[in-house]
Image (cartoon, helix red, strand yellow):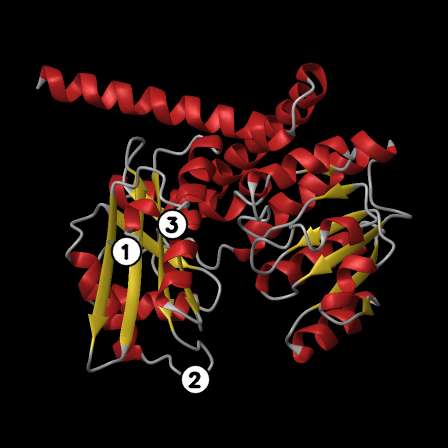
Amino acid sequence: MGKTLFDSPSFANHEGVHAFHDEKTGLKAIVAVHSTARGPAVGGTRMWNYATAEEALEDVLRLSKGMSYKNAVADLEMGGGKSVIIGDSRTQKSPELFRAFGRFLNGLGGNYYAAEDVGTSVEDIAEARKVTEYVLGLKDGPEASGDPSPVTAEGVFRSNLVVARRLFNQDDMTGLTVAIQGVGHVGAYLAEKLHKAGAKLIITDVNQANLDAVAAKTGAEIVSPDAIYDVAADIYAPCALGATLNLQTLDRLKVKAVCGAANNQLATADIGDELFRRGVLYAPDYVVNGGGIINVASEMNARQSGGAYDASWVEGKLSRLMDTFEEILERSVVENKPTHLIADAIAEARIKAAAEQKAELLKAA
Protein backbone atom coordinates (compact mmCIF):
# COMPACT_ATOMS: atom_id res chain seq x y z
CA MET A 1 0.00 0.00 0.00
CA GLY A 2 1.39 3.43 -0.95
CA LYS A 3 1.95 6.40 1.30
CA THR A 4 -1.17 8.23 2.44
CA LEU A 5 -1.79 11.74 3.68
CA PHE A 6 -1.55 10.51 7.26
CA ASP A 7 1.99 9.23 6.63
CA SER A 8 3.25 12.67 5.67
CA PRO A 9 5.85 14.06 8.08
CA SER A 10 3.99 17.37 7.88
CA PHE A 11 0.63 15.94 8.94
CA ALA A 12 0.12 17.17 12.52
CA ASN A 13 -3.32 15.91 13.51
CA HIS A 14 -4.95 18.32 11.07
CA GLU A 15 -8.70 18.58 11.47
CA GLY A 16 -9.31 18.60 7.73
CA VAL A 17 -7.54 18.66 4.37
CA HIS A 18 -9.68 19.54 1.33
CA ALA A 19 -8.79 19.36 -2.37
CA PHE A 20 -10.74 21.40 -4.92
CA HIS A 21 -10.76 21.29 -8.72
CA ASP A 22 -12.75 23.38 -11.17
CA GLU A 23 -12.27 22.26 -14.75
CA LYS A 24 -13.71 25.40 -16.35
CA THR A 25 -11.28 27.83 -14.67
CA GLY A 26 -8.38 25.43 -14.15
CA LEU A 27 -8.50 25.89 -10.39
CA LYS A 28 -6.56 23.30 -8.41
CA ALA A 29 -6.50 24.18 -4.72
CA ILE A 30 -5.85 22.56 -1.36
CA VAL A 31 -7.15 23.91 1.94
CA ALA A 32 -5.66 22.57 5.18
CA VAL A 33 -7.41 23.26 8.47
CA HIS A 34 -4.99 22.50 11.28
CA SER A 35 -6.95 23.63 14.33
CA THR A 36 -10.18 25.42 15.18
CA ALA A 37 -9.65 25.18 18.95
CA ARG A 38 -9.31 28.96 19.34
CA GLY A 39 -11.86 29.87 16.64
CA PRO A 40 -12.35 29.58 12.88
CA ALA A 41 -9.14 28.72 11.02
CA VAL A 42 -7.68 31.77 9.30
CA GLY A 43 -4.71 31.92 6.94
CA GLY A 44 -3.55 33.22 3.60
CA THR A 45 -3.94 31.80 0.12
CA ARG A 46 -0.68 31.10 -1.69
CA MET A 47 -0.60 30.72 -5.47
CA TRP A 48 2.56 28.99 -6.59
CA ASN A 49 3.69 26.92 -9.56
CA TYR A 50 4.39 23.78 -7.54
CA ALA A 51 6.27 21.05 -9.38
CA THR A 52 3.94 18.35 -8.02
CA ALA A 53 0.69 18.07 -6.07
CA GLU A 54 2.66 16.33 -3.30
CA GLU A 55 4.88 19.40 -2.97
CA ALA A 56 1.78 21.61 -2.69
CA LEU A 57 0.31 19.30 -0.05
CA GLU A 58 3.47 19.36 2.06
CA ASP A 59 3.55 23.16 1.86
CA VAL A 60 -0.07 23.66 2.89
CA LEU A 61 0.26 21.22 5.79
CA ARG A 62 3.33 23.02 7.16
CA LEU A 63 1.87 26.46 6.60
CA SER A 64 -1.47 25.67 8.24
CA LYS A 65 0.19 24.35 11.40
CA GLY A 66 2.33 27.48 11.43
CA MET A 67 -0.84 29.59 11.30
CA SER A 68 -2.26 27.82 14.36
CA TYR A 69 0.90 28.67 16.26
CA LYS A 70 1.06 32.22 14.87
CA ASN A 71 -2.52 33.02 15.82
CA ALA A 72 -2.09 31.49 19.28
CA VAL A 73 1.13 33.39 20.05
CA ALA A 74 -0.52 36.63 18.89
CA ASP A 75 -3.39 35.77 21.28
CA LEU A 76 -6.06 35.91 18.59
CA GLU A 77 -9.40 34.12 18.78
CA MET A 78 -8.69 32.27 15.58
CA GLY A 79 -7.46 28.84 14.62
CA GLY A 80 -4.95 27.97 11.94
CA GLY A 81 -5.46 27.08 8.29
CA LYS A 82 -3.94 27.77 4.90
CA SER A 83 -4.80 27.36 1.24
CA VAL A 84 -2.64 26.89 -1.82
CA ILE A 85 -3.58 27.26 -5.46
CA ILE A 86 -1.40 25.31 -7.88
CA GLY A 87 -0.49 27.55 -10.81
CA ASP A 88 1.64 30.39 -12.12
CA SER A 89 0.34 33.60 -10.53
CA ARG A 90 1.78 35.67 -13.39
CA THR A 91 -0.04 33.87 -16.19
CA GLN A 92 -2.88 31.75 -14.82
CA LYS A 93 -4.89 34.15 -12.68
CA SER A 94 -8.39 35.15 -13.64
CA PRO A 95 -11.38 36.68 -11.84
CA GLU A 96 -13.32 33.50 -12.62
CA LEU A 97 -10.67 31.35 -10.94
CA PHE A 98 -10.93 33.27 -7.67
CA ARG A 99 -14.71 33.26 -7.79
CA ALA A 100 -14.56 29.47 -8.20
CA PHE A 101 -12.22 29.37 -5.20
CA GLY A 102 -14.73 31.42 -3.22
CA ARG A 103 -17.55 29.03 -4.06
CA PHE A 104 -15.48 26.13 -2.76
CA LEU A 105 -14.82 28.01 0.47
CA ASN A 106 -18.57 28.14 1.04
CA GLY A 107 -18.55 24.37 1.24
CA LEU A 108 -16.36 24.53 4.36
CA GLY A 109 -19.12 26.36 6.19
CA GLY A 110 -16.97 28.97 7.92
CA ASN A 111 -14.37 26.57 9.30
CA TYR A 112 -11.75 28.45 7.25
CA TYR A 113 -11.34 32.09 6.20
CA ALA A 114 -8.86 32.91 3.43
CA ALA A 115 -6.71 36.04 2.98
CA GLU A 116 -3.95 37.05 0.58
CA ASP A 117 -0.46 35.55 0.60
CA VAL A 118 2.45 34.95 -1.78
CA GLY A 119 1.16 35.10 -5.36
CA THR A 120 -2.24 36.56 -4.48
CA SER A 121 -3.46 40.07 -3.78
CA VAL A 122 -6.29 41.92 -2.07
CA GLU A 123 -7.85 42.29 -5.53
CA ASP A 124 -7.90 38.51 -5.94
CA ILE A 125 -9.52 38.11 -2.52
CA ALA A 126 -12.08 40.76 -3.50
CA GLU A 127 -13.10 38.59 -6.47
CA ALA A 128 -13.67 35.64 -4.13
CA ARG A 129 -15.68 37.92 -1.84
CA LYS A 130 -18.28 38.35 -4.58
CA VAL A 131 -19.44 34.79 -3.94
CA THR A 132 -18.38 34.05 -0.34
CA GLU A 133 -18.21 35.73 3.06
CA TYR A 134 -15.31 33.53 4.15
CA VAL A 135 -12.46 35.80 3.08
CA LEU A 136 -10.59 38.57 4.89
CA GLY A 137 -8.09 41.29 4.03
CA LEU A 138 -10.40 43.43 1.92
CA LYS A 139 -9.71 47.03 0.97
CA ASP A 140 -13.26 48.39 0.75
CA GLY A 141 -15.85 48.94 3.47
CA PRO A 142 -15.67 50.18 7.08
CA GLU A 143 -14.39 46.85 8.43
CA ALA A 144 -11.79 46.34 5.67
CA SER A 145 -8.22 45.89 6.86
CA GLY A 146 -6.63 46.16 3.41
CA ASP A 147 -3.19 44.86 2.46
CA PRO A 148 -1.66 43.27 5.59
CA SER A 149 1.89 43.59 4.24
CA PRO A 150 2.71 46.98 5.87
CA VAL A 151 1.68 45.71 9.32
CA THR A 152 3.62 42.48 8.81
CA ALA A 153 6.68 44.53 7.88
CA GLU A 154 6.22 46.76 10.94
CA GLY A 155 6.27 43.73 13.24
CA VAL A 156 9.41 42.34 11.58
CA PHE A 157 11.06 45.77 11.78
CA ARG A 158 10.28 46.09 15.50
CA SER A 159 11.64 42.59 16.00
CA ASN A 160 14.88 43.63 14.31
CA LEU A 161 15.09 46.53 16.75
CA VAL A 162 14.63 44.08 19.65
CA VAL A 163 17.49 42.00 18.22
CA ALA A 164 19.66 45.11 17.83
CA ARG A 165 19.12 46.06 21.47
CA ARG A 166 19.82 42.55 22.73
CA LEU A 167 22.85 41.72 20.60
CA PHE A 168 24.37 45.07 19.75
CA ASN A 169 23.18 47.28 22.62
CA GLN A 170 21.67 49.95 20.38
CA ASP A 171 18.19 51.38 19.81
CA ASP A 172 18.37 51.75 16.04
CA MET A 173 20.02 49.93 13.13
CA THR A 174 22.91 52.32 12.54
CA GLY A 175 26.03 50.50 11.46
CA LEU A 176 24.31 47.14 11.11
CA THR A 177 24.06 45.22 7.85
CA VAL A 178 20.88 43.30 7.06
CA ALA A 179 20.72 40.77 4.23
CA ILE A 180 17.14 40.64 2.94
CA GLN A 181 16.07 37.67 0.85
CA GLY A 182 12.97 38.71 -1.07
CA VAL A 183 11.80 42.30 -1.59
CA GLY A 184 8.20 41.77 -2.59
CA HIS A 185 5.40 43.41 -0.63
CA VAL A 186 6.68 42.77 2.90
CA GLY A 187 10.39 42.77 2.07
CA ALA A 188 10.17 46.12 0.30
CA TYR A 189 8.37 47.77 3.22
CA LEU A 190 10.87 46.25 5.63
CA ALA A 191 13.82 47.49 3.58
CA GLU A 192 12.56 51.08 3.70
CA LYS A 193 12.03 50.93 7.47
CA LEU A 194 15.48 49.43 8.10
CA HIS A 195 17.10 51.97 5.81
CA LYS A 196 15.46 54.88 7.64
CA ALA A 197 16.69 53.36 10.92
CA GLY A 198 20.28 53.44 9.65
CA ALA A 199 20.89 49.91 8.37
CA LYS A 200 23.03 49.02 5.39
CA LEU A 201 21.11 46.61 3.14
CA ILE A 202 22.10 43.72 0.91
CA ILE A 203 19.13 42.42 -1.06
CA THR A 204 18.15 39.68 -3.47
CA ASP A 205 15.02 38.60 -5.31
CA VAL A 206 14.04 36.70 -8.45
CA ASN A 207 12.22 39.84 -9.66
CA GLN A 208 14.65 42.40 -11.05
CA ALA A 209 12.07 45.20 -11.06
CA ASN A 210 11.54 44.77 -7.31
CA LEU A 211 15.30 44.85 -6.73
CA ASP A 212 15.78 47.99 -8.80
CA ALA A 213 12.92 49.81 -7.03
CA VAL A 214 14.16 48.99 -3.53
CA ALA A 215 17.79 49.74 -4.38
CA ALA A 216 16.80 53.14 -5.79
CA LYS A 217 15.04 54.05 -2.53
CA THR A 218 17.53 52.60 -0.06
CA GLY A 219 20.91 52.39 -1.77
CA ALA A 220 20.92 48.64 -1.14
CA GLU A 221 23.55 46.38 -2.66
CA ILE A 222 22.04 43.76 -4.99
CA VAL A 223 23.36 40.18 -5.09
CA SER A 224 22.21 37.04 -6.89
CA PRO A 225 19.67 34.79 -5.13
CA ASP A 226 22.22 32.14 -4.19
CA ALA A 227 24.86 34.65 -3.06
CA ILE A 228 22.70 36.04 -0.23
CA TYR A 229 23.83 33.20 2.05
CA ASP A 230 27.51 34.13 1.69
CA VAL A 231 27.42 37.87 2.35
CA ALA A 232 28.96 39.44 5.45
CA ALA A 233 26.00 40.73 7.44
CA ASP A 234 24.79 41.06 11.02
CA ILE A 235 21.22 39.88 10.42
CA TYR A 236 19.74 37.59 7.77
CA ALA A 237 16.11 38.49 6.99
CA PRO A 238 14.40 35.81 4.88
CA CYS A 239 11.28 37.37 3.37
CA ALA A 240 10.45 35.00 0.52
CA LEU A 241 9.56 31.30 0.66
CA GLY A 242 10.37 29.01 3.57
CA ALA A 243 13.00 26.39 4.41
CA THR A 244 15.97 28.59 3.47
CA LEU A 245 17.61 27.62 6.76
CA ASN A 246 18.75 24.11 5.92
CA LEU A 247 21.77 21.82 5.84
CA GLN A 248 22.95 23.34 2.56
CA THR A 249 22.86 26.98 3.74
CA LEU A 250 23.68 26.77 7.44
CA ASP A 251 27.48 26.68 7.10
CA ARG A 252 27.43 29.55 4.62
CA LEU A 253 25.73 32.06 6.91
CA LYS A 254 28.01 34.55 8.67
CA VAL A 255 25.32 36.38 10.64
CA LYS A 256 24.64 36.78 14.36
CA ALA A 257 20.85 36.66 14.02
CA VAL A 258 18.01 35.55 11.73
CA CYS A 259 14.96 37.81 11.80
CA GLY A 260 12.70 37.87 8.75
CA ALA A 261 9.13 37.64 7.48
CA ALA A 262 9.10 34.30 5.63
CA ASN A 263 6.98 31.45 6.98
CA ASN A 264 8.56 28.10 7.94
CA GLN A 265 12.14 29.32 7.70
CA LEU A 266 13.55 26.21 9.38
CA ALA A 267 13.65 23.28 6.94
CA THR A 268 13.51 21.00 9.98
CA ALA A 269 13.29 21.71 13.70
CA ASP A 270 16.84 20.52 14.33
CA ILE A 271 18.13 23.42 12.23
CA GLY A 272 16.83 25.68 15.00
CA ASP A 273 18.72 23.57 17.53
CA GLU A 274 21.90 23.95 15.50
CA LEU A 275 21.51 27.73 15.21
CA PHE A 276 21.21 27.88 18.99
CA ARG A 277 24.29 25.71 19.43
CA ARG A 278 26.25 28.03 17.14
CA GLY A 279 25.15 31.12 19.03
CA VAL A 280 22.99 32.53 16.23
CA LEU A 281 19.83 34.20 17.56
CA TYR A 282 16.81 32.87 15.68
CA ALA A 283 13.69 35.03 15.85
CA PRO A 284 10.83 32.52 15.46
CA ASP A 285 9.17 33.38 12.17
CA TYR A 286 5.55 33.00 13.22
CA VAL A 287 6.16 35.34 16.13
CA VAL A 288 7.87 38.23 14.36
CA ASN A 289 5.69 38.10 11.23
CA GLY A 290 2.39 38.08 13.14
CA GLY A 291 1.50 41.70 12.37
CA GLY A 292 -0.36 40.85 9.19
CA ILE A 293 -2.69 38.32 10.76
CA ILE A 294 -3.35 40.73 13.64
CA ASN A 295 -4.45 43.27 11.04
CA VAL A 296 -6.72 40.68 9.43
CA ALA A 297 -8.14 39.72 12.84
CA SER A 298 -9.34 43.28 13.35
CA GLU A 299 -11.43 42.92 10.19
CA MET A 300 -13.01 39.73 11.50
CA ASN A 301 -13.76 41.46 14.83
CA ALA A 302 -15.40 44.37 13.02
CA ARG A 303 -17.46 42.08 10.81
CA GLN A 304 -18.72 40.08 13.80
CA SER A 305 -19.58 43.17 15.84
CA GLY A 306 -20.89 45.30 12.99
CA GLY A 307 -18.24 47.91 13.77
CA ALA A 308 -15.25 49.28 11.89
CA TYR A 309 -11.57 48.45 11.51
CA ASP A 310 -9.75 49.52 14.69
CA ALA A 311 -6.14 50.60 14.19
CA SER A 312 -5.65 51.10 17.93
CA TRP A 313 -6.64 47.48 18.61
CA VAL A 314 -4.10 46.35 16.01
CA GLU A 315 -1.39 48.48 17.62
CA GLY A 316 -2.19 47.09 21.06
CA LYS A 317 -1.99 43.49 19.85
CA LEU A 318 1.24 44.18 17.94
CA SER A 319 2.84 45.76 21.01
CA ARG A 320 1.89 42.78 23.16
CA LEU A 321 3.29 40.43 20.52
CA MET A 322 6.62 42.23 20.80
CA ASP A 323 6.45 41.74 24.57
CA THR A 324 5.96 38.02 23.91
CA PHE A 325 8.98 38.04 21.60
CA GLU A 326 11.07 39.64 24.35
CA GLU A 327 9.81 36.97 26.76
CA ILE A 328 10.83 34.21 24.34
CA LEU A 329 14.35 35.61 24.00
CA GLU A 330 14.73 36.01 27.76
CA ARG A 331 13.42 32.52 28.51
CA SER A 332 15.77 31.09 25.89
CA VAL A 333 18.70 32.50 27.85
CA VAL A 334 17.41 31.56 31.30
CA GLU A 335 16.28 28.05 30.32
CA ASN A 336 19.17 27.49 27.89
CA LYS A 337 16.75 26.37 25.17
CA PRO A 338 16.42 27.32 21.49
CA THR A 339 13.94 30.12 20.82
CA HIS A 340 11.78 28.02 18.49
CA LEU A 341 11.14 25.51 21.26
CA ILE A 342 10.13 28.27 23.69
CA ALA A 343 7.74 29.78 21.12
CA ASP A 344 6.26 26.36 20.29
CA ALA A 345 5.63 25.66 23.97
CA ILE A 346 3.74 28.94 24.39
CA ALA A 347 1.62 28.30 21.29
CA GLU A 348 0.90 24.68 22.15
CA ALA A 349 -0.14 25.54 25.71
CA ARG A 350 -2.61 28.14 24.45
CA ILE A 351 -4.06 25.81 21.82
CA LYS A 352 -4.36 22.97 24.32
CA ALA A 353 -6.11 25.19 26.87
CA ALA A 354 -8.60 26.38 24.23
CA ALA A 355 -9.25 22.82 23.04
CA GLU A 356 -9.92 21.65 26.60
CA GLN A 357 -12.27 24.55 27.22
CA LYS A 358 -14.10 23.84 23.96
CA ALA A 359 -14.46 20.17 24.91
CA GLU A 360 -15.89 21.09 28.31
CA LEU A 361 -18.44 23.41 26.72
CA LEU A 362 -19.53 20.69 24.28
CA LYS A 363 -19.82 18.21 27.15
CA ALA A 364 -21.99 20.63 29.10
CA ALA A 365 -24.23 21.44 26.14
Q: Residues within 10 Å of mark 1 (few under 14, many from 20)?
A: few
What residue sits right under mark 3 in the picture?
Answer: 61
**What kind of element bears circle 1?**
loop
Upstream in sequence: badge 3 or badge 2: 3
Q: Left or right of 206: which side holds 201?
A: right
Measuring 22% from the left and 45% from the top, which residue is drawn there? Answer: 111
Mark 2 or 1, closer to the camera? 1
Q: What amino acid is labelled 3 in the image? A: Leu
Q: Left or right of 54: which side holds 251?
A: right
Q: Residues within 10 Å of mark 3 (few under 14, many from 20)?
A: many
| Percent coordinates x, y for residue 19 in the rendering | 24, 61
Give residue 2's mark.
1
Q: Could you tell me which quadrant the C terminus lies in? A: top left
Q: Is residue 35 above or below residue 61?
A: above
Mark 1 or 3, closer to the camera? 1
Q: Is residue 278 above or below residue 245?
A: above
Q: Are marks 1 and 3 in contact (CB under 8 Å)?
A: no
Would you say residue 137 is visible in this rendering?
no
For residue 69, which quarter of the picture? top left
Measuring 43% from the left and 48% from the top, which residue is drawn there? Answer: 62
Q: Are marks 3 and 2 in contact (CB under 8 Å)?
A: no
| Percent coordinates x, y for residue 285 in the rendering | 58, 43
Q: What amino acid is labelled 1 in the image? A: Gly
What residue sits right under mark 2 in the picture?
Answer: 91
**What kind of element bears circle 2?**
loop
Q: What amino acid is labelled 2 in the image? A: Thr
Closer to the camera, 138 or 358?
Answer: 358
Upstream in sequence: badge 2 or badge 1: 1
**What kind of element bears circle 3?**
helix
| Percent coordinates x, y for residue 9 in the rendering | 41, 45
